Every structure is written in C-alpha cells, then in structure tokens.
Image (cartoon, grey):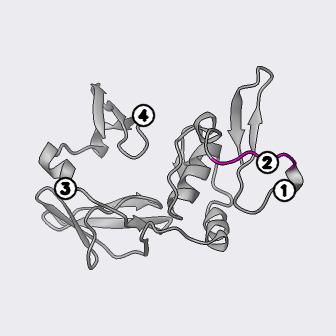
Amino acid sequence: STIVEEGEDWIQITTNYDNYPCWISAKQHTRITNTDFKSLTTTVLSSELVQVISNKNTNSVFPLTVGATLPNFNDGKFKIGDVEYSFEGQTVDGSIKTINDLKATAYLFLNAPYLWGGRSPFGIDCSGFTQLVYKLNGYQLPRDASQQVELGNPLSFVEEAEAGDLAFFDNEEGNIVHVG
C-alpha cells in the first residue's frame, strides 16, 4: 500500500492489490522499507472467516479476516521485514477454482451485515463481496461495481446466465451502482 495522507488517528492509502484509495486506522499500519515491500510475494490467502496471527518477536496476537494475504507463507509462518508471524488457520493458494468452490465461498458470507466499503464478514458491500469471493478463487476483480462491469462478456438474455456470472444494476442516470 502507498500512503497518500496521514492524520492523527487515520491514514489514507492506496492498496497495492487493486489500486483503490481507502482509509485505515493508524494502529493497523506498520511501515516497511521499499526493499521489504518488493520482496513480498504471495499467492497464499487466509480462508478462515477470522483467524489470529502471532508476532513471534513480541508474542502479541491480532486477527485477520478471510482473504488476507500471507506474504512468503511457508509451513505456518510468514515474515514481513524482520518480524515473523505464525498462522495456524486454513489457506488457499490463489489458483483458479471451480464454480462449486466459488459458490461455497459465497455462502461463507451468508448473514454478514451490509457495510458500505466493507470487505469482511464483519461488514461487506456488494462489490466487496464479489471482489473477495473471486479473489479467494483465483480471480482478481477491481473494487467497485462500476469497474467490475468492464470485465467479462455481456449476455444478451438473462436466461443465458450461469452460476458464477455477475449481474449489474444501474440507477436512473444509467450508472452502475450494484452488483450481485
């Protein structure tokens, strides 16, 4: 992530995954060097709704939600800079999955509350839902419905739709404002 602006308690960043601007609590942020950032490779993601990681240096623990990347993950451990973390939860490797896997992942979020801008089981919006479900199944989608509609092939008739297809909805001005 790239820092755009810093406040007293909040930091505005642009995420590396989808180049999306967002705000995070300053407590959720740790600075790393450009060298460390460039060394972060990952195809491993947490597939647990919520799981804790443990900082090996301080023995402190904190939660990660489903879809969190685990950089350089190997044998239950990953390292960012000089800090090593342990993770004992289930993971997915970022490879392309089947339609049945996609559907099973979508059901993980059943009853998750709606939260504009959310991308976790604690609160999720429509495009955060589609982005995260597809991410866990090996596909990278942009963050917003208006960006996601630009991908794929449009269907002529709703009867042609299959499991895994995305449906987009527009407002009175014709702008895409929802995805399902």
The numbered mark, 1 or 3, whose residue comes first in the sequence reads 3
Q: Residue at horizontal 29%, vertical 25%?
A: 5
Cα distance between the residues tagged 1 and 3: 43 Å
Front disc: 3 or 2: 2
The numbered mark, 3 or 4, whose residue comes first in the sequence reads 4
Discs 2, 1 touching: Cβ within 8 Å: yes
> Which residue carries the number 2 mark?
155
> Image check: 88 left or right of 176?
left
Front disc: 3 or 4: 3
> Which residue carries the number 4 mark?
22
As shown in the figure, which amino acid type bears the numbered disc 4? Cys
Q: Residue at horizontal 58%, vertical 58%?
A: 133
> Image check: 160 left or right of 100?
right
User: What's the magenta region?
Assistant: 152-157
Q: Is residue 121 visible?
A: no
Percent x, y of residue 132: 54, 54
**Mark 2 secondary-structure assignment:** loop
Q: Is residue 97 above or below residue 172?
A: below
The numbered mark, 1 or 4, whose residue comes first in the sequence reads 4
Name the mark on residue 39.
Answer: 3
- Other residues around mark 2 within 10 Å, as few (<14) / some (14–19) / many (≥20): few
> Which residue carries the number 1 mark?
160
